[in-house]
Image (cartoon, rainbow, N blue to C red):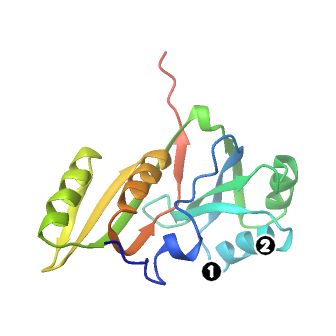
C-alpha cells in the first residue's frame, strides 16, 4: 500500500511530478554567466518574479576555480516569458556577463534526483531493481528505507519519478536542469 507523500515531497508540494514542461509545451533554456557576488541570484530571480515569468527550474554553481563567475541555468515557459523580453531584462542587470539561449535540440541537458523510499523486504528488491534499470545507484541504506540517486535527461528523471509513485516516497529532491551546447561533430 502506498502512503501519501510527505509534505516535503515535491510530488505533494507541486501537485504533480517533475519540473519538466508538459509535452508539447515549449520552453527556453537560458545560460546566464554572472559575477559570483552576494545578491546576484536574488536579483535574477526577483526579475523573473516581478514580471510574472514562470521558471520551471533554476540551477546555479561556480564555473571557475577562483569562484569569480557562476553559471545560472534557467528553464522558462515560453508563454509566460517572451525570449527577447527576458534577455533584455537580464542584460540590464549589472552583474550579468553573458546570456545565451540553448535550444533543447542543440543542448545536452541533465538533472539529478535523490529519493528516499520507505521499503519492506519485497519493495526493497523491487526499488533496487528499478534503480538499476534506470542506471541509478543506491546511496544510503537504512533498516526500512533506501536513498537512491539518478542523473540523466529530465524526461528520464520524470519517468523514474512516475514509476516511484507506486512506492512510499518519503523525500524527493531534484537539482533543476543544467545544460551546455552540444559539441560540433565535424
- For the view shown, which residue lies furthest in the bottom direction? 7
Of callouts 1 and 2, the N-terminal one? 1
Estimate the x, y position of residue 87 in percent, counting from the top left. Answer: 81, 52
The residue sitting at 49% across, 46% down in the picture is 155
- For the view shown, which residue lies furthest in the front direction? 1
Estimate the x, y position of residue 92 in percent, counting from the top left. Answer: 85, 62
Estimate the x, y position of residue 146 in percent, counting from the top left. Answer: 22, 71
> Which residue is nearer to you in this view: 147 or 4?
4
Estimate the x, y position of residue 9 in percent, counting from the top left. Answer: 46, 76
The residue sitting at 67% across, 80% down in the picture is 39
* Mark 1–mark 2 distance (CA, rounded to whole Å): 19 Å
The residue sitting at 78% across, 67% down in the picture is 48
Question: Residue 105: which disc?
Answer: none
Quadrant of res 121: bottom left
Image quadrant where one finds the N terminus: bottom left
From the viewer's perspective, is residue 162 above or below residue 135? below
Q: Secondary structure at mark 1?
A: loop
According to the picture, the residue beneath numbered tag 1 turns out to be 38
From the viewer's perspective, is residue 173 above or below residue 85? below
The residue sitting at 82% across, 51% down in the picture is 79
Q: Residues within 10 Å of mark 2 (few under 14, many from 20)?
A: few
> Which residue is nearer to you in this view: 147 or 41?
147
**In the rendered view, does 140 fall on the left or right side of 94?**
left
According to the picture, the residue beneath numbered tag 2 turns out to be 49
Quadrant of res 81: bottom right
Q: Which of label 1 and label 2 is nearer to you?
A: 2
Q: Secondary structure at mark 2?
A: helix
> Which residue is nearer to you in this view: 111 or 148?
148
**In the rendered view, does 96 fall on the left or right side of 160?**
right
Amino acid at each position: 500500500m502506498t502512503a501519501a507523500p510527505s509534505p516535503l515531497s515535491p510530488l505533494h508540494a507541486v501537485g504533480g511530478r517533475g519540473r519538466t514542461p508538459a509535452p508539447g509545451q515549449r520552453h527556453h533554456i537560458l545560460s546566464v554567466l554572472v559575477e559570483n557576488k552576494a545578491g546576484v541570484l536574488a536579483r535574477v530571480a526577483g526579475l523573473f518574479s516581478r514580471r510574472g515569468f514562470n521558471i520551471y527550474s533554476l540551477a546555479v554553481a561556480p564555473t571557475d576555480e577562483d569562484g569569480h563567475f557562476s553559471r545560472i541555468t534557467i528553464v522558462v515557459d515560453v508563454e509566460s516569458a517572451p525570449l527577447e523580453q527576458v534577455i533584455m531584462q537580464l542584460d540590464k542587470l549589472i552583474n550579468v556577463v553573458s546570456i545565451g539561449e540553448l535550444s533543447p535540440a542543440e543542448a545536452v541537458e541533465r538533472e539529478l534526483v535523490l529519493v528516499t523510499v520507505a521499503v519492506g523486504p519485497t519493495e526493497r528488491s523491487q526499488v533496487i531493481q528499478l534503480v538499476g534499470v534506470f542506471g541509478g545507484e543506491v546511496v544510503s541504506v537504512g533498516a526500512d528505507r533506501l536513498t537512491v540517486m539518478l542523473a540523466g535527461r529530465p524526461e528520464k528523471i520524470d519517468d523514474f519519478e512516475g514509476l516511484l509513485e507506486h512506492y512510499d516516497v518519503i523525500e524527493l529532491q531534484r537539482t533543476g536542469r543544467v545544460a551546455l551546447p552540444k559539441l560540433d561533430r565535424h
